[in-house]
Image (spheres, grey):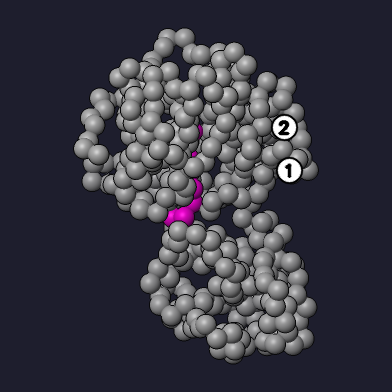
């Protein structure tokens, strides 16, 4: 599916053939209940924001930090209803009624009483959850005395793993916005500009595009020709200098689905240095990306993907050479010592990272999104824009 939004000066313009979000929400809910039936699960307790968004389509508040675990959403097989922890239906779709909310409280006894009162919970025999706390098993025994607590992570991972066309459309739309933000940030690359200023440009552009909640702030990392290249995910006050290489790895959200694109640029006297001949590290990174794309076929294992990177001369980035993409980062994850047994399935969307460290030419990073099994032979297709950023516009320094 093509990207579902067009970028205009005033923000996002939906296109007629964009994802059917209402229908997608219904299908996701049905998948959750079908998986519960297949695993003989009577009650599914979800606490992670991505799980709640998948099952209900609820828009949650963005927090500058982590969320403690809590029974944020409870799916009950006997009634086919999903109950949310909250006192307001702001951001909650109409198919989750106000009567399906149960109140938050600092008093655990009040939460226990609210959950115990939900229809179908007390009679449950199998309760699944994807996370918990030290006292969570005792909590479940107090609200469903005859239930056994089981792991629900595999259930939800299987449901979310393969993306339908509307999910792919959301990811493609998010990648379109990310590419726009990348071009805007790249246009401000120049000597004297700090990493934090580039981060501010990125956050500002996302706001202009109607995406005020950034999926990440780890979008810029620079090093000089004299330094050993290391990928960092925390921007600093470091100011760019001519000859520096800068990794720009940006992301955006559409309907909570994440898309992104990453590349490396070289700082010139007035902006990005443009050369007819790519640096050796860039050519090696292109070869690694091609090897990655060829390896990401239906049925391929994480070990095969990792071996393809090594054979092409790539370096394993710390956060992984391949990650699943959807409502944020999802399985599979192929990283040093992780993910060799993972198997790629048709319909997965993955982000692949080509990272090389050349002894004579420094480092180079490229990241793209791919849809596995897009063709009959099991090969991939790229998602969203894949072109290089446009020529930079002149940098205008502001008063600081």
Q: Residue drawn 43% across and 70% down?
A: 92
> For the residues marked 1 and 2, what is the alpha-carbon distance in whole angstroms?
9 Å
Q: What numbered label is drawn on residue 306?
A: 2
Q: What numbered label is drawn on residue 9?
A: none
Residue 361 at x, y percent in the picture: 56, 15
Quadrant holding the C terminus: top left
Q: Label 2 crowding class (10 Å Cα cut-off): few <14, some 14-19, many 20+?
A: many
Residue 286 at x, y percent in the picture: 56, 21
Report the front residue among 16 and 33: 33
Q: Residue drawn 43% across and 64% down?
A: 61
Q: Quick check: is 96 in the magenta stretch?
A: no
Element class at badge 2: helix
Q: How many marks?
A: 2
In the image, the segment drawn in magenta is 255-262
Q: Main secondary structure of the magenta part?
A: strand
Q: In the rendered image, is residue 22 in sight?
A: no
Residue 8 at x, y percent in the picture: 26, 41
Residue 297 figure quarter: top right
Most extreme residue toward the top, as rendered?
Answer: 277
Q: Earlier in the sequence, mark 1 or mark 2?
A: 2
Contact, mark 1 vs mark 2 (Cβ under 8 Å) = yes
Q: Label 1 crowding class (10 Å Cα cut-off): few <14, some 14-19, many 20+?
A: many
Q: In the rendered image, is residue 223 in sight?
A: yes
Q: Is residue 68 left or right of residue 60?
A: right
Element class at badge 1: loop
Residue 315 at x, y percent in the picture: 66, 27
Q: Residue drawn 30% across and 19% down?
A: 270
Q: Residue drawn 40% across and 68% down?
A: 91
Q: Is 167 rendered above or below residue 237?
A: below
Q: Is residue 395 left or right of residue 71?
A: left
Which residue was labeled with disc 1? 339
């Amino acid at each position: 599916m093509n990207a579902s939004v067009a970028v205009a000066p005033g923000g996002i313009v939906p296109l007629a053939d964009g994802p059917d979000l209402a229908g997608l929400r219904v299908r996701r809910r049905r998948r959750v209940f079908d998986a519960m039936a297949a695993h003989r699960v009577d009650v599914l307790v979800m606490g992670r924001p991505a799980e709640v968004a998948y099952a209900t389509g609820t828009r949650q508040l963005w927090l500058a930090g982590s969320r403690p675990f809590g029974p944020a959403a409870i799916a009950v097989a006997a009634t086919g209803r999903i109950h949310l922890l909250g006192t307001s239906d702001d951001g909650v779709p109409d198919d989750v009624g106000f009567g399906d909310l149960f109140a938050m409280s600092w008093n655990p006894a009040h939460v226990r009483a609210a959950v115990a009162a939900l229809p179908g919970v007390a009679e449950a025999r199998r309760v699944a959850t994807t996370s918990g706390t030290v006292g969570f098993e005792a909590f479940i025994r107090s609200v469903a005395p005859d239930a056994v607590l089981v792991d629900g992570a595999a259930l939800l991972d299987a449901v979310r793993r393969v993306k339908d066309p509307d999910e792919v459309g959301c990811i493609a739309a998010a990648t379109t916005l990310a590419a726009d933000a990348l071009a805007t940030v790249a246009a401000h690359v120049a000597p004297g500009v700090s990493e934090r200023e580039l981060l501010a440009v990125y956050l500002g552009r996302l706001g202009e595009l109607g995406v005020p909640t950034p999926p990440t702030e780890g979008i810029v990392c620079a090093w000089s020709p004299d330094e050993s290249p290391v990928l960092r995910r925390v921007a600093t006050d470091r100011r760019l200098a001519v000859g520096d290489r800068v990794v720009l790895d940006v992301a955006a959200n559409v309907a909570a689905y994440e898309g992104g694109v990453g590349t490396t640029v070289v700082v010139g006297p007035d902006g990005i240095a443009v050369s007819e001949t790519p640096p050796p590290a860039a050519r090696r990174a292109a070869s690694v990306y091609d090897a990655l794309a060829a390896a990401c076929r239906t049925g391929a294992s994480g070990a095969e993907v990792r071996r393809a990177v090594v054979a092409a001369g790539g370096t394993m980035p710390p956060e992984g050479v391949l990650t699943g993409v959807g409502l944020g980062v999802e399985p599979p994850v192929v990283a040093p010592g992780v993910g060799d047994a993972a198997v790629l399935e048709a319909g997965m969307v993955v982000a692949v990272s080509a990272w090389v460290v050349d002894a004579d030419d420094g480092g180079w990073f490229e990241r793209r999104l791919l849809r596995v099994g897009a063709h009959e032979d099991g090969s991939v297709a790229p998602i969203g824009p894949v072109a290089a950023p446009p020529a930079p516009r002149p940098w205008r320094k502001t008063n600081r």
